[in-house]
Image (cartoon, rainbow, N blue to C red):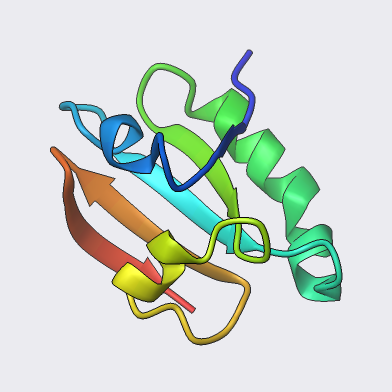
Amino acid sequence: MGKTLELNDSNFDEAIKGDKPVLVDFWAEWCGPCRALGPKLEEIAGEMAGKVKVVKLNVDENQETPSKYNIRGIPAMLLFKGGSQVGQLV
């Protein structure tokens, strides 16, 4: 069964590399819609285990990465493959 992983600014770039797509959820504790999305992302991580890696990045604790990818509002999700952004959902 899959599970979402918590990333931070220091391990983000390494985590999005590789052939497997990576769905990144940019979120914060105070964000109600972000918290509501959490259980669904856990479900997706389980259903897509082995096909897609689902990860989360707290924007309050890690500000460098959201700034790099121009995240202006949350929840926001980016899809990466091979280290490159291939999709976005805001």
Residue at 44% over, 78% down? 71
Which residue is most to the bottom? 72
Is the residue 23 above or below the residue 20 in the image?
A: below
Name the spot of residue 88 as percent of width and height, x first: 34, 70
In depth, the one of 85 and 10 nearer the eye is: 10
Residue 34, quarter of the rendered image: bottom right
Is the residue 37 above or below the residue 48 in the image?
A: below
Is the residue 16 above or below the residue 50 in the image?
A: below
Q: Is residue 1 left or right of residue 51?
A: right
Is the residue 46 above or below the residue 38 in the image?
A: above
Name the spot of residue 5 as percent of width and height, x first: 59, 30
Name the spot of residue 57 as percent of width and height, x first: 56, 51
In depth, the one of 60 and 86 nearer the eye is: 60
In depth, the one of 64 and 53 nearer the eye is: 64
Name the spot of residue 18 as percent of width and height, x first: 18, 27
Residue at 49% over, 86% down? 72
Total labels: the figure holds 0
Residue 60, quarter of the rendered image: bottom right
Q: Is residue 50 left or right of residue 44?
A: left
Residue at 80% over, 73% down? 31
Work out which quarter of the rendered image holds the N terminus and state it: top right
Q: Is residue 65 left or right of residue 33?
A: left
Residue 16, quarter of the rendered image: top left
In depth, the one of 30 and 33 nearer the eye is: 30
